[in-house]
Each structure stands twice: as structure tokens, then as C-alpha cells.
Amino acid sequence: MELFKKNNLLPLISPLLPNNPIVVEAGAFNGADTKEISQFWPQGTIHAFEPVPEIFTKLKKNTSDLHNVVRHEIALSTATGNTIFYVSEKPSRPGEPFKAGSLLKPKERLKWSDIEYKKTINVPTITLDDWAQKNNVTHIDFMWLDVQGHALHILKAAPQLLKTIKILFVEVEFIQAYENQYQYNDVKTWLEQNGFVEIGRDFENTNKWFYGNALFRKK
């Protein structure tokens, strides 16, 4: 098990992926990570998902010069349709959507930070398998899931694409941060049952903070 920092994540997994990987990044926010992934794999294709309109506008602007980034203003989820999205914001920037928004209603995470959820919006959703079929995507080499407690929901709803994923980078929670949310041990156990092994994490234990990031490889 390797303890990694975000700035050495891509070099760490690079030997496990082709030079032109198909990457799916869910929860792309303003495109900062998207840009890094795009520049690291200039021959790859990065599909960046961001459902909040104001944030999507920033993502589009910040990645407009990247030829290998495809932007999707939709949320990956358990069904194809529309649903409620809980929009987050910082008290210091009222009315400006922040990156901690979720399809799940905030719960215990409200005790850990000053992030507020003052409004909800309706956003379009799609399952990973439905999206892949509509866009002629046959496999995913690397999947980046920064979706505030919704990662395992997305994966469970994608039995076909799940078989093709080589590397998974997943934000995991150690508390019931959101309602109806799976916690780290749930995610780890389910992925192991479905042919993945944990190869890294950016946390030493689960007591210092309420979430972290884990790295999984298909066996």
C-alpha cells in the first residue's frame, strides 16, 4: 500500500496505463485537475463531468484550449433523467457555487467545515453505461471520482463499463457525510468483491479528517 500525495498521483499510475488513456473525471469543478490530466496525457481523451451550470462555465473557459478534453454538463448517477443537486458555497463567497456540492443531502459533514448548502437545483443525470453507449465509449482506462459520497452509487449502476476500468481514483468518506452515502470500508469491500485491489491512499488513518482519497487497480 503506497501513501501518495495528489501531486505524485499521475506519475504513480502512469506505468499502469497506455500512453493514450480514456479518462473519465466526474466532479471536474473548475478544470484545475482536468488540465493537469490533459497535459500529462496529451494523447489521451479526458471526459470531464460537471453538472452545476455556473461551475461548468468556468470548466469550459479554463479548458477551452485543451484539444483532448470533452466536457459534459451532466452528473453521473444511478439513473438517466433529472434529480436534485445540493449546491455548496463558502460563507466568505455567498451565492458562488463551491466544489462540495452533491447529489446526496449533506449530513455529518456539516459539523466538520463551514461549507453551507443554501439551495438546490435540478440537474440532468445519466448512468455511466448509458453515457458510454450514447457516445460509443467501449472502455475506461482511468476513472477519477470526486463526487462527494456518490462514487459507489455511480459504479454500481455501471456493470458493463466497470469491467473495463483499469485504475480508479475515488474520494471516500469516513463518516456519514451525506445521507444514503457509502463509507470508505463499504467502497473498498465492494470494489474488492468486483476484482479491484487498493494500491494507494492519501491518508494514514481515518481519524484526522472526514474524507480522503483511495486508489484502486483492476486485478
Image (cartoon, rainbow, N blue to C red):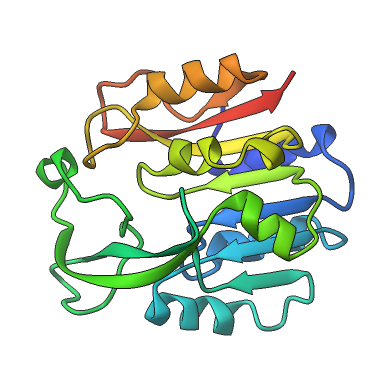
Image coordinates for residue 97, horizontal then vertical, percent: 29, 72
Q: Is residue 12 above or below residue 142?
A: above
Q: Quadrant of the N terminus?
A: top right
Image coordinates for residue 150, horizontal then vertical, percent: 40, 44
Q: Is residue 195 above or below residue 32?
A: above
Q: Closest to the observer: 196 or 30? A: 196
Image coordinates for residue 215, horizontal then vertical, percent: 58, 30
Kindly indicate the quadrant of the structure image that contains residue 60: bottom right
Q: Closest to the observer: 92 or 126? A: 126
Q: How many numbered circles are shown?
A: 0
Q: Closest to the observer: 93 or 49? A: 49
Is 188 displayed left or right of 178 in the figure?
right
> Residue at (69%, 35%) from the top-left corner?
167
Kindly indicate the quadrant of the structure image that contains residue 48: bottom right
Q: Closest to the observer: 52 or 61? A: 52
> Residue at (42%, 26%) from the top-left corner?
203
Res 1 seen here? no
Q: Quadrant of the C terminus?
A: top right
Kindly indicate the quadrant of the structure image that contains residue 198: top right
> Residue at (20%, 75%) from the top-left corner?
93
> Residue at (67%, 62%) from the top-left corner?
47
Image coordinates for residue 64, horizontal then vertical, percent: 66, 83
Is 148 displayed left or right of 214 in the figure?
left
Res 157 seen here? yes
Is 33 displayed left or right of 153 in the figure?
right
Q: Is residue 186 above or below residue 22?
A: above
